Image (cartoon, coloured by chain):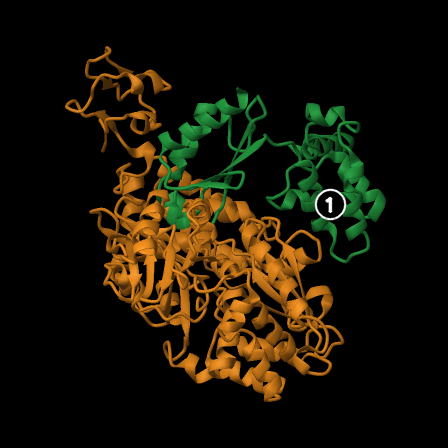
Chain colours: A green, B orange
Amino acid sequence: MYYCLEKRQFTEFMRIQRIQPATPQQEASPESVDLTLMDDLLEKYKNQKGNLIPLLQGAQDIYGYLPKAAFERIHRVTGLELNEMYGVATFYAQFRLEPAGKYIVKMCHGTACHVQNVTAITDEILDTLGIKDGETTSDGILTIETVACLGCCSLAPVMMIGDETYGKLTPKEAVRIIKELRRSENG
Amino acid sequence: MGNTKVIVGLGSCGIAAGANKTYNEFQRIMTTDKLGFELKKTSCIGMCYREPLVEIIDDSGTYLYGEVNLERVEDIIDKHIKKFSPIPEYIVQSDKYPSKDQAFFDGQVKISLRNCGHIDPESIEEYEARDGYEAIRKIAREKLSPESVIQQVLDSGIRGRGGGGFPTGLKWRFAHNNQSDKKYVICNADEGDPGAFMDRSILEGDPHGVLEGMIICGYTIGASEGYIYCRAEYPLAIKRLNLAIKQAREKGYLGKNLFGIKGFHFDLKIKEGAGAFVCGEETALIASIEGARGMPRRRPPFPAEAGLWKHPTNINNVETFINIPWIIHQGPQAYAQYGTEKSKGTKVFALTGKIRHGGLVEVPMGITIKDIIYKLGGGITGDNKFKAVQLGGPSGGCIPEYLSHTRVDYESVNATGAIMGSGGMVVMDETTCVVDIAKFFLDFTQKESCGKCTFCRLGTKRMLEILTRITEGEGREGDIEMLEQLAETIKDSSLCGLGQTAPNPVLTTLKYFRDEYEAHIRDRKCPALSCKKLLTYTVIEEKCTGCTVCAKGCPVDAIEGERKQIHHIDQDLCIQCGVCYTRCKFDAIKLS
């Protein structure tokens, strides 16, 4: 497919592939992202060796995701290259480039949970919410994510909402918890 | 009551099981009833299947209570604490009462886990009260040279507990012998292996033990700086490590001219991992600390020569470091008395899956898999038959039931095609499909492959596609041979351990369960009744109440039947999604 494109088209094709589609929140920026929140973080890591990952982690702690403007600010202050930051941000599972829901539901898909049939539970939850893995519900309340292992293997199957861990789940139980949380949020 | 101590286990899994609520309830009743017992925290004792656990120590003895929910808290306070009459039904271990759970503790030798569940991990004093920081003091007092420390580590026979099994003493010697003005010690706490949680338990339960191991390593190789590279998914471990480092600095155990050894400076930092399994590989981990994508590079030069920022660096796993202070303090012979000729000491395993007593066990090397599963683990859950055990996670393999007499040491486990790995032991019964397990691990390695080597990046993807096809009933003749060919090529052509071992789960299952692969491909059957697409769903007429839940849930309207009448599934329309099976409240859907 690539070879039939002109060079200019090719670069554009690649570019389209690489840049994330802007979400409504991002389009509204830079006003919606308060970059001064990063002042302390930048001050702390500005001249440290190996500061790239801690800076991105810090920024994500502040905004819940990595807004484009945050990359640019880090670049202006520290001189770290945008492409390097983007490379790192897309390499590691921890970083997200789009805002997540208010609650992130982590479905543990570690070996022990897999053996105890967590896939059926995740499918049931996704089915109930009508979203796919990694997506956020339209009301912005819930993001469902499958993760490798939460390390609570003897309670398998396990899911984690915020800091709360729920163990020994069944599909019914899991859907009930999710529905209840959503209902309490939507009033 | 004045001498009564109530100790609540607050490790991550305990908290997940509700231990915080248990702790708060004790505190609430203690305050409202003005009771004079001492309430303390500890971490995981390894008995995960009975969490939350509460230990009560009074003048009469020690009593470990299991599954302490809020009701049991009240009971324990009323009967045991107020009336000094312990409740045998809740006791899982005690020096006064026999317990059917006692077998879980018998046969364990706790060296790595010596303090886990016995001290408050947030108190440096409690660590010191159990010979903490005695090993480094011994080195200072007896003026042991770095060479003699290395010799002791070598004599103990300890090998790298991260999975590789390289002799720790040799590794230290390499780093020691390389001259440089700057050297580093790194603790690999990036426990990414799904199904393994021993490092997390050690970090949460005995952070000072890890620190002391690193300090000793720093002294030995001549390093002044150390890093603990810990998964961000372990927030509690990070919190406790940070606290431990702060306490150690205040006590003067980190800093300059430590323990009276002139010129010995050492300090530690924590680096949080950002979620990449490949960072468990030494060179990828170093790249990650330097702030780059965690991609492995070619060795040599080995980290001992040119590691972090091109300086000599020694990397060991959490479990390796925690053993060091014990070895120095008790002497290398004490450690070497356990284990086999080539694999000395003990190993911690995370016992999970279809097992009655899941949790953390520390056993001497050389014990058989059967003993771990049946004696310590209490056997298989339910009435199903034991089928296989998975050792070593995504880099390891499945050992079938008929090889369960295999001894757990590096050589014997490798001979089966699996690896010792970091110690995840997932037990599977006859309802677990091994093809599905192989697919599960390939899915994992395929996602976690960093993409540097073509054969790992593309090969794992192709293998996953074939396995997916097989589990969905679309396997073809020649698939097995293609899997084998891909597996060998990936093993031969990958740079780092991830790629070199990624095909192991497929190769071992092919070796021991080839007939199951063939059943999937030729007969379109899953013998374990696990692969959804290969099942037939039928309604058990005696159980069906006609509630219509299955019919409503069916995405292709394959289920018909009037309300309160028996329903039927149209096999021509059924897409084997399994929704009816999971939704039915009356277990009226049969799989065959």
**Residue ranking furthest to the top:** B562
Would residue A6 be visible to someone looking at this image? Answer: no
SS class, disc 1? helix
Q: Position of residue A113 (x, y in %)?
A: 40, 44
User: B355 or B202, which is in the foreground?
Assistant: B202
Residue B449, x across and y down, in percent: 56, 49
Residue A59 pos. (x, y %): 71, 42
B4 with respect to B170 (left or right)? left
- Per the image, the residue denoted by label 1 is A85
Q: Nearer the viewer, residue B291 or A143?
A: A143
Of residues A4 and B231, the one nearer the viewer is: B231
The reply to whether residue B165 is visible in this rendering is yes
Point 52% across, 53% down: residue = B192
Can you name the residue that lies furthest to the left here? B542
Q: Amino acid under label 1?
A: Met
Rendered-image quadrant of the N terminus of chain A: top right
The residue depicted at 62 percent of the width and 87 percent of the height is: B145
Seen in the picture, residue B306 relative to B351 is either above or below; the reply is: below
- Residue A68 occupies which quadrant of the picture? top right
Left or right? Give the position of B572 relative to B109: left
